[in-house]
Every structure is written in C-alpha cells, then in structure tokens.
Image (spheres, grey):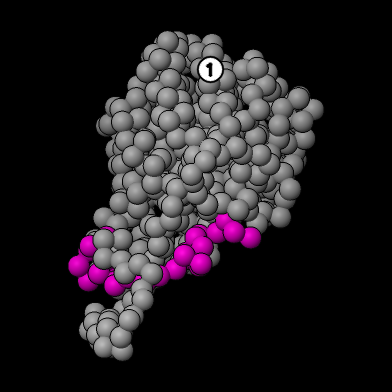
Amino acid sequence: MTFYSEFLPNTRRASYSLASQVLFQVPVQLVAFHQLAFTTKEMKSSFLLLTALVGVVVATPTPRAACTSPVKLSGNPFQGRTLHANSRYAGEVNNAVAQITDSTLKAKAQKVASVGTFLWLDTIASISTFEKYLTETQCNEIFGVVIYDLPGRDCAAKASNGELAAGDVSTYQTKYIDPIVAIIKKHPEVAIAAIIEPDSLPNLVTNSGLATCQASASGYRQGVQYALKNLNLPNVAMYLDAGHGGWLGWDANLQPGAQELANAYKGAGSPASLRGFSTNVAGWNAWSKVPGEFENTSDGQYNKAQDENRYVNLFGAALASAGMPNHAIVDTGRNAVQGLRDAWGDWCNVDGAGFGVRPTTNTGNSLADAFVWVKPGGESDGTSDSSAQRYDSFCGLADAFKPSPEAGTWNEAFFEMLLKNAVPSF
C-alpha cells in the first residue's frame, strides 16, 4: 500500500537533512543534503562529525521530477499516489513548531508538515496562489483541492459565510470556477482530487426551511453543476460533498440526499471525472465505532449510519440506485477521539479532539477510496467571541474549544491539542 504519509511518503525517496528546524527554526528543506554520496573517507567523517555536533539527523523527502506526460485518471485516483503535502499548510505547521518549547512535542509537530492535506480555495483571492502550490506536486503524488465559494455559502451557519451574495452565480462562474479550470488545464501532468462545495447540497436537504437556504438553493444547484461540468478533466477526480453520517445518514435523509447529489451529477451531463462523494469533511465522526458515539441515544434507532464506514455503505448504495458514481473519500484529520460532543450536530472546534489516521488507501472498504486530511488541523472552525459579527453559537457551546479565532485562522493551542491527542501518535 503506497498512499501513506505518517513519516515519509515513500521510503525509496529518503535522504537526510540536518535538523536545523529544531535548532534554528529554518525550514528543513532549505538545508537538505539530497542523495548523499561520499567520495572520500574524510568527507564522510566530516559529515558525521557535523551531525554529531548538531545532535540529530532526520529523514526528509528528496525532490522528484514532475510527470512528463498528461495524467489520465481512472479507478481509485489515490492508488499508487501520495497525497501532496502542500507548502501552505506546511508553512503554518513550521510556524507552529517555532512556538513549541517542549522538545518531544516539537519533534512530533515537525512530522505533521509532511502529511498530505487538501488546499482550500475559499475565496476568489485564494486562486492567486493556487498555481504555485499545484506546481509543487510530483508525478507519484495527487494534489487535493477543495472548491468552496458558492454564492450564499454555508446558508445554515455564520462562522464560514462566503464572499458572494446568494444568487450571484455569474461571479462564481466567471471569477471563481473559470480561473481555477484555466490553471488546471495548464497543468495536465498533475493528478488532482477535488472536493466540490462542502455542506452545500446537504444544506438544501435538511435546512430548506431557513430563509437563507431558500435564497441560496437555486444558486447552489447552478453553481455545483457548473463546477462539475467544467472540472470534468482527465487529470481530475471529483468528489461531491455529502456531509456525514450524522447529517444525511438519517432514514428520512438518505434517499433525498442521494437524489439531490444525483440530480446535480446528471444536470452537469454525468461527467466522467466524478468519482463519487466526500464525507466527514472538517468533521469528527469515527470511521468505525460500534456502538456509534450517538447510537444509544433516544433517536439512534432512526439513523443506521452511526459511523462513517456504515454511512459510506448506506449512502453509497442510495447513490448507486439514484444513478451516480458512489466511491468515497473520508476526512480523518481530526476524528481520533470520540465521546467529546454533547450532540451529534456540534461541529465547531471540538475540545479534546486529536489528529486521526494519516492519509491511506487502506480503508478496508471497497467503496472508500482513501482516508484523507481535508481540514487543515490547527485552523479554526469559527470564533468563540460572542461579540464578533461572524460568531456562531455552536462555537460557544460547552464542548467547543475556547478561546478560538475566526474561521480559517490558526489556533496554536488547538493544534498542540490535536497533536497530543493524535491516534496513531506521531
């Protein structure tokens, strides 16, 4: 199994670098000794003396060549590829490392920078750096990107409301999707996994009574179909977001949810690049837990998707019946610790959480292509400041970590908590 990045994405690429990041907070890539070859005993002795003086040598990947020909994805796009560890998240982690004084925790934190994580394009402005991160991707990697800027985004929440007004489909198409597509077309040699608009269609299934979601519904459907149609490229594998088991897994929501996603797929012309659906994005649900975290509650009998494994099977079957591809990817970035939430719907900065299983294709479920890290662990879900304009009451609940900054802003204390509670540990 090749898609695993707990230590090195591919041990065949291992070389060595001085652990200057520990001592001097210099990014480890800047001082890497790639493909060391000692031509004399003196050179080798000098290197060994140097490393002894520094005190520690750590493994680091050697840069690889990009693909020389266009990529055409088929089947599980993660099979044989490592999820790319983009330098944006690595930079956030490296900055966090510099603030940690405990040497053991610091060493663990450094390893997080090498874990493959999705890049979120959550504003039009964020597209300006997309190509930079995309072109870092090498031939045996796959780049993960989240498409996330629908007009009236997150109609049922306040913490992550988008920049585009409800119904502004034209701007979404021409200023957001079209530039992203143009960049991807320039780089057909890069394999890409794209998650399409987290929470959007699930909101239309369960929150249709809210005025904000009613105002956004038409724009959501038009926008998602436009994204699916235009991102239908040979080197792209798309996963349309389906919430999680505690959202669309309820008996009353499974079929309507599957039909909503299938309608988008068919409305976009049944794009060949759509592989299936994403689940647990930025979420906390366990992959496999019996009984589930909320299985023994008074209404647990009405939801058979009590963990994400069962949800993938149930929702996947419903999608197949509705005529849509049904393979899944599951966000395991922050789901290591269970039993923390007071209610299944508590989604904001869950206190006591830990980093979960690192990206891998070893899921044990033929419908689940991979476990992936989608939400960058350490970035906030929303502010706990009740006076803030974007304050959402879920971020002030008893089971939410406090204090927490605005959504997307780094929270050092939360990152260190995730690290300490990681399963498996770093």
Residue 311 lies, with reference to residue 377, above or below; the image says above
The residue sitting at 52% across, 41% down in the picture is 69
Q: Nearer the viewer, residue 397 or 348?
A: 348
- In magenta segment, residue 86: no
Tally of numbered discs: 1
| Image x and y of residue 426, in percent | 45, 67
Quadrant location of residue 217?
top right
Residue 63 in view in this figure: yes
Regarding mark 1 in the picture, which secondary structure is present there? Answer: helix
The residue sitting at 43% across, 52% down in the picture is 65
- In magenta segment, residue 4: yes
Residue 417 in view in this figure: no
Q: Nearer the viewer, residue 327 or 99?
A: 327
Q: Residues within 10 Å of mark 1 (few under 14, many from 20)?
A: many
The residue sitting at 44% across, 16% down in the picture is 173
Looking at the rendered image, the quarter that the N terminus falls into is bottom right
The residue sitting at 35% across, 30% down in the picture is 127
| Image x and y of residue 92, in percent | 31, 51
Residue 53 lies, with reference to residue 6, above or below; the image says below
- The residue at the far right in this view is 321
Q: Identity of the amino acid at label 1?
A: Tyr
Quadrant location of residue 16?
bottom left
Numbered range of the magenta stretch = 1-27
Q: Nearer the viewer, residue 389 or 53?
A: 53
- The residue at the far front in this view is 39
Q: Is residue 275 left or right of residue 116?
A: right
| Image x and y of residue 353, in percent | 47, 54
| Image x and y of residue 19, in percent | 29, 71
Question: Which residue position is annotated with label 1?
Answer: 226
- The residue at the far left in this view is 24
